[in-house]
Image (cartoon, helix red, strand yellow):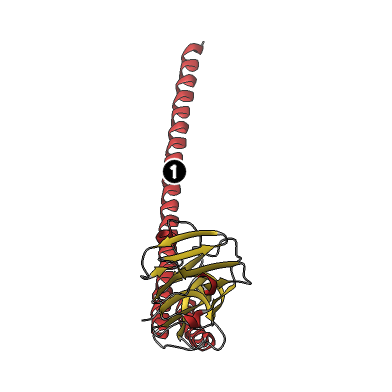
Amino acid sequence: MADVSRFARSDRAQFILVSGLLIAVVLVALVLLLNATIYTENVATRGVDSGANDALQYQETLSVGLAGLVEEENEGEYSEWEEVETNVTRGTGILVERLGQQHVERGVIATADVRFDPGVRIWDEEGLNDDEIARDVTEVRSFTIDPEDLPEEEESLDIVVGENEWVLSLYDDGGVIAEVNGTSCEKESEEEITLQNSDWCDGEYEWAEDVEPGYDIQFVNGSTVNGEYELVASGEIGDDLQANHTAFVYGATIDLTYRSSQIEYSTNESLEWEAPR
């Protein structure tokens, strides 16, 4: 009679051996799968990193090229915004097209839309006039006045913003008196005054407070005042202005899109420039 217990022990041993082999195979498969996953992620990451670097390089190249173009045009001393706008728009179109063509050859779509903000620099060293200085102003970067002989209160020099929405009146009463919408302060001497900043006036006013952007600026009774002034602002030159003036690019907004097989990147960037001197 066969030894049943011996066969039972043999079957159990084979079962254990086969189970061990199966577990080993599963573990090896898991290791291989894990390695493959890590490898795939590394490859994908390298691809994404490369695509991101290319997109950022395109953005930087465009920004640097645009800055150089605008700085050169801003030295042109244009009398009208339309002139400088036409030139920078044409030059930017050529720049964007050429950069885009270089990337198309690599299977990349790189495009950009650029919008320019007009700027004005207006100055006069021989006195003020009753002029509309600037139109459609959204921001005043610098506005200084150095009066020599301000009138008395009855004929004050008024800087009018908008449709008389905000008025800064300057007159002489033993010192420079400034009145803004019922608030007044005094400056002891007729030295240069920074109008857009009220630090000289103990912070008694805020430039163009509560006036919506897109306003005009003008002098009233300016012809009675000797001295000089300078305005640098985003906006356009006033009509029939007699003072020295130049139009320039105040700022630009770039809307950029970069698409490749590895990445899709969109952003916007703002640039600003100082007024030419």
Kindly tell me whether residue 265 is visible in this rendering: no
What is the quadrant of the C terminus in the image? bottom left
Q: Position of residue 157 (x, y in %)?
A: 50, 74
Q: In the rendered image, which quarter is residue 220 located in?
A: bottom right
25 or 49, nearer to the observer:
49
Residue at point 42%, 85% (across, down): 73
The correct choice, above or below, for 8 with respect to 24 in the image is above
The amino acid sitting under disc 1 is Leu
69 or 272, nearer to the observer:
272
- Mark 1 Cα-neighbour bin, 10 Å: few <14, some 14–19, many ≥20: few
Residue at point 55%, 73% (across, down): 137
Residue at point 42%, 77% (across, down): 230
Judged from the image, the secondary structure of the residue bearing numbered disc 1 is helix
The correct choice, above or below, for 176 with respect to 87 in the image is above
**Total numbered labels:** 1
135 or 42, nearer to the observer:
135
Q: Position of residue 110 (x, y in %)?
A: 50, 73
138 or 74, nearer to the observer:
138
Q: Position of residue 4 (x, y in %)?
A: 51, 12
Kindly tell me whether residue 81 is visible in this rendering: yes
- For disc 1, the marked residue is 34
Toward the right, the furthest residue is: 163
Q: Position of residue 43 (x, y in %)?
A: 42, 56
Q: In the rendered image, which quarter is residue 228 located in?
A: bottom left
